[in-house]
Amino acid sequence: MKNFSWKTAVLWTLPILVVGFFLWQGSVGSANPSADTGRNTASTSMTYGRFLDYLDAGRVTSVDFYENGRTAIVEAVDPQIDNRVQRWRVDLPGNAPELVERLRTADISLDSHQPRNDGAIVGILGNLLFPILLIGGLFFLFRRSNGGAGGPGQAMNFGKSKARFMMEASTGVMFDDVAGIEEAKEELQEVVTFLKKPERFTAIGARIPKGVLLVGPPGTGKTLLAKAIAGEAGTPFFSISGSEFVEMFVGVGASRVRDLFKKAKENAPCIIFIDEIDAVGRSRGAGIGGGNDEREQTLNQLLTEMDGFEGNTGVIVIAATNRADVLDSALLRPGRFDRQVSVDPPDIKGRREVLEVHARNKKVADDISLDVIARRTPGFTGADLANLLNEAAILTARRRKEAVTMLEIDDAIDRVVAGMEGTPLTDGKSKRLIAYHEVGHAIIATMIKAHDPLQKVTLIPRGQAQGLTWFTPSEDQMLISRAQLKARICGALGGRAAEDVIFGDSEITTGAGNDLQQVTNMARQMVTKFGMSDDLGQLALESEQGEVFLGGNWGGRSEYSEEIASRIDIAVREIVQACYATTCNIIRENRDVIDRVVDLLIEKESIDGDEFRRIVAEYTTVPEKERFVPQL
């Protein structure tokens, strides 16, 4: 019913009204109105001949005529029921003028009841009611089709833009409310200044940018930046989603683009914000047999409006997407989107600022350190951090505390990353095996210098995992060394190695399935992508293949021969086997401390990184990892 239009409604409504009208007329015409429903009733009927016999015998006491003399109600003495008076209904012949004379001669009470005109009144009402309903229904439908009833997407408004217009946007968000993405803020603050004080730039020949494209992963604050621009600029603001341009009807999207820019030019200088522009801006001609013609025509119209023959003065287009790789190249060129602003996940300083913004309206304990939370959340976006503090606040309310503490923050981080807490494991062989598995990860991370520091090891199930080992990078890593990659492979193999060494080859479980996938992926990237193989050397043997429906090649093309493919498999296997051998040696050398930590873990269910390292230091020398202290 998604495409149920007003025309379809009319086609269905008209026959229903017409059929209903004739049914009404038929019911009115077949009605049998009576003059007096209170008296025109009789329990039995009597033939006209028997009526004359009763009349001759002097048994009739009164006669009431109805329906212009065609029917009569007769009261007479019935000898069959002890001469009691009975009422009969008698159908009279059409012409019996002598009957009235006979009744008068016999001195019988006569009365004649004229028919009421109810049928005519009901008929007139029926004739007027349905035409009125028909006209009213058509008026209502046409009023909706013209947008008068406020219905969305009506027939006459298919080609009209659905953009929300605000003469002075009051989003409640300003640049002070946006933190952690300072570079993007500076770019957009300049656009706002251009709108407010254009003479500062035009005096030296600078022209206003025609478009700004915000590119970044989901949750980094692209839409929030657009709200801040709307709140700061003080100019007319149009906002629309890319999906609202495209309809199943041909030409609708292009018409909406024309209507949007027409309104924008009438209110220039102004801002147009298009969220998720990849819905309409994907590469043209992508895929086998071409793309969606309607979407491509919409994109063509957008390209023309942004920088075409007529020009586009005083209108700045700001768009947001997390799929810049699929956008059409004509859309990305200077003159359309002059600037591409990267909105990346915040670094540790940015996370600290984001946490400050979202902690303003929450009651937090005095001992909470936002610096510690920022260090523990590498890779979190602004949306993730907002969700983290909200989850911590919910946990605080559930536990009936007055302020958020670090305990709620820790639990909220675990919940955001790994999922909801499950049912605790019962003591037994399975719990001990999982404990050895997780401690295997933890001991490898502790004993290998290049590995990320251990944060916590726990047996509390979360999501699909029965146990978890958490690591915290020392810093926001942009580049990863070969030693770090091998250390991560060893750390991921620690669980399987512990099962193998402690319980034997026949007792290894499926718990390392996800670990092995990560290991294989990292080792293959070392060989084929990063050139870290001793055998194959500094070669990038695999390149990124574009998706066929985004304009890429069908099926891809192998970048190497079968011989090289075999050597790649051997090199990947050698890296994994060497790391596994190293991991097993570390497990054997630290068997005593592993047994002690496992017993403690089964008892406490969670051990933090500092306590774990302190226990390990009692048995062996723990390598000192490089500590990165950020300037917050």
Image (cartoon, rainbow, N blue to C red):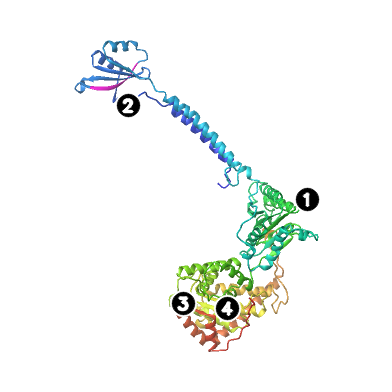
Question: Does residue 210 lie above or below 422 as drawn?
Answer: above
Task: Indicate the quadrant where residue 536 lies.
Answer: bottom right
Q: Earlier in the sequence, mark 4 or mark 1?
A: 1
Question: What residue would you read off at disc 4?
Answer: 493
Give 597 or 86, whichever is nearer the viewer: 86
- Gap in Å between the C-alphas at discs 1 and 2? 86 Å
Give 330 or 526, whichever is nearer the viewer: 330
Q: What x and y, as percent, mark residue 497?
A: 55, 80
- Gap in Å between the C-alphas at discs 3 and 1? 72 Å
Please name the amino acid that badge 2 sits on: Gly
Q: What x and y, as percent, mark residue 86?
A: 25, 22
Which residues make up the magenta segment?
85-92
User: Helix, strand or loop at disc 4?
Assistant: helix
- Residue 463 in view (yes/no): no
Q: What x and y, as percent, mark residue 369?
A: 56, 75
Question: What residue would you read off at disc 3?
Answer: 431
